[in-house]
Image (cartoon, coloured by chain):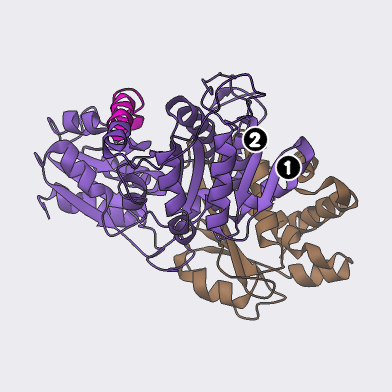
């Protein structure tokens, strides 16, 4: 089975970081994996996205053109990629930042106010990991076990204090019922 | 830990650019000279972090031209050295590439291609194929050109490239594209077996104990210059006989053969799987060495293949080598995007279907 995931938002929201965590998590579950960032002249405030592919077979093209799962962390990303999602796929929307509803009727849609939740919990930089928790819940690309091991691969040793906060953020999203 | 690459060092996720840099260090390169340009800057950034910690040299030169000439200086001493850049920057290095060839110096040069011509764009491309395999600069010379199609190959071919450069006293070029440089995949990195090469030609100081060596590309006597050219091409013939690398994918019964390297080969694999599911007998030859080109593999394939499809991120460059290798025995058609665009698996599948339906143009 192959799952193509597209995580899209503003630069600075941690889109590339959450994708990297996802890729590590999958790799540590002995899955084949690829991670490809958009690398335009973006910076904080511009658009950013990354393609993550998780598969049982070696990954062919690393470019996600028809995502099975789309995480939209801002309106331009939802506008741009909503129609690209594969029929029967999943769209996860940060409903704090995106007021409109998804128009597609052939996909499963989850709304989660990740940015608001992050703010309420005092972890304002971790909306990306809250929404990733939701992805782990609703998509079987990776499991919810042993989050720490994968987090240790992506959170630098200098920021060890962030390990627990990242784990907390993932659990918040995982347990969020909409 | 065992994985798809066998039992090796622990797998880590790395960008292709970073894998090149770490592999170069493992291969014994301690002298890196570069200048930033998207999409290869992570090579330089990685070297900047690592080289000072291991007693090596990282130097951000004032220009690409300076960097290649610094490479020439280190190469003259017999030490392993490299530079990296992206397409417009490689053009600036052209003079140095010719001088390295004329001086018979080993070096590794990395080109993580972006769209062109001119300053072009920053998205992935394969449009420097001609430059790498034909006319990198003036004079009769070749470079060994290695085309990775995964992050693991970015690392493996970097190590292999250093060995080939030392073995044949010439430049090895890694010809990658922006996708290969930017993407992360699991990679296992282990120091390669240490091989020793004859470096008796190197300029290392004589201590007044031996005649001094001269590294030079200027020969004013044409008979002498002709001799160096013939000798060099004798070496190139050896390389063509011994160093060809390619991958065959589902070629046993293939009636259509895709020719593709790098990311184009990755995209093509998806298309081939989809076409096979519809009963179309299609396979692929993926050149890993672009020079020397796997001529024999294509010539042999032409015995049972009806049509070749060259899938490229360019206006069609490798297609000429496929035609030469097959001596035009079968039609060779193009499936391409350019300027930083990448063909989708659906586009390649569409082309396969057209060819399967009898289209030969």
At mark 1, the secondary structure is: helix
- Where residue A5 sits, quadrant-wise, is bottom right
In the image, A129 versus B68, the foreground residue is B68
Return the residue at label 2.
B25
In the image, B87 versus B178, the foreground residue is B87
Return the residue at label 1.
B50
Magenta segment, which residues? B229-248
From what the image shows, is residue A81 above or below residue A37? below
- Residue A57 horizontal/vertical position (percent): 48, 36
Disc 2 is attached to a residue of which chain?
B
Q: Residue at x 64, y 29 (%)?
A: B205
Q: Residue at x 69, y 55 (%)?
A: A18
Residue A75 has which mark? none
Chain in brown colour: A
- Residue B214 horizontal/vertical position (percent): 50, 33
Q: Colour of chain B?
A: purple
Q: Are marks 2 and 1 on the same chain?
A: yes
Badge 2: how crowded within 10 Å, few (<14), some, or many (20+)?
many
């Amino acid at each position: 089975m192959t799952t193509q995931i597209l995580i899209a938002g503003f630069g600075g929201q941690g889109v590339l970081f959450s994708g990297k965590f996802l890729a590590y998590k999958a790799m540590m579950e002995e899955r084949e994996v690829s991670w490809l960032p958009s690398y335009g002249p973006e910076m904080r405030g511009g658009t950013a996205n990354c393609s993550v592919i998780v598969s049982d077979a070696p990954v062919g093209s690393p470019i996600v053109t028809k995502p099975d799962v789309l995480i939209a962390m801002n309106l331009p990303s939802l506008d741009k990629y909503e129609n690209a999602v594969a029929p029967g796929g999943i769209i996860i929307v940060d409903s704090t930042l995106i007021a409109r509803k998804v128009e597609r009727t052939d996909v499963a849609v989850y709304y989660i106010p990740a940015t608001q939740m992050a703010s309420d919990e005092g972890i304002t930089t971790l909306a990306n990991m809250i929404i990733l928790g939701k992805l782990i819940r609703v998509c079987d690309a990776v499991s919810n076990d042993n989050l720490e091991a994968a987090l240790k691969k992506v959170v630098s040793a200098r920021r060890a204090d962030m390990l627990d906060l990242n784990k907390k953020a993932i659990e918040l999203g995982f347990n969020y019922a909409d | 830990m065992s994985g798809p690459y066998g039992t090796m060092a622990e797998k880590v996720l790395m960008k292709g650019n970073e894998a090149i840099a770490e592999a170069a260090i493992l291969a014994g390169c301690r002298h890196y000279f570069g200048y930033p340009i998207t999409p290869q800057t992570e090579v330089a950034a990685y070297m900047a972090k690592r080289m000072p910690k291991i007693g090596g040299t990282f130097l951000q030169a004032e220009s690409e031209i300076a960097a290649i000439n610094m490479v020439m200086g280190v190469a003259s001493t017999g030490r392993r050295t490299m530079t990296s850049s992206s397409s417009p920057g490689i053009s600036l290095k052209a003079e140095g590439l010719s001088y390295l060839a004329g001086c018979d110096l080993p070096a590794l040069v990395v080109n993580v291609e972006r769209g062109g011509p001119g300053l072009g764009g920053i998205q992935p491309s394969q449009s420097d194929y001609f430059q790498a395999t034909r006319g990198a600069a003036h004079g009769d010379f070749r470079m060994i050109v290695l085309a990775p199609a995964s992050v693991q190959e970015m690392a493996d071919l970097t190590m292999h490239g250093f060995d080939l450069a030392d073995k044949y006293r010439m430049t090895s070029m890694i010809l990658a594209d922006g996708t290969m440089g930017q993407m992360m995949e699991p990679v296992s990195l282990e120091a390669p077996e240490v091989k020793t090469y004859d470096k008796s030609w190197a300029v290392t100081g004589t201590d007044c104990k031996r005649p001094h060596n001269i590294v030079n590309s200027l020969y004013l006597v044409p008979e002498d210059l002709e001799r160096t050219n013939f000798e060099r091409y004798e070496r190139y013939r050896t390389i063509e006989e011994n160093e060809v690398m390619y991958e065959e994918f589902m070629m046993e019964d293939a009636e259509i053969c895709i020719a593709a390297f790098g990311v184009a080969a990755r995209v093509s694999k998806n298309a081939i799987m989809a076409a096979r599911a519809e009963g179309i007998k299609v396979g692929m030859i993926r050149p890993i060495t672009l020079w020397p080109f796997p001529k024999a593999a294509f010539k042999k394939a032409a015995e049972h293949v009806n049509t070749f499809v060259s899938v490229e991120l360019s206006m069609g460059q490798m297609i000429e080598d496929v035609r030469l290798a097959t001596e035009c025995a079968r039609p060779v058609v193009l499936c391409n995007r350019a300027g930083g665009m990448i063909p989708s698996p659906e586009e390649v599948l569409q082309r396969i279907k057209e060819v399967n339906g009898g289209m030969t143009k």
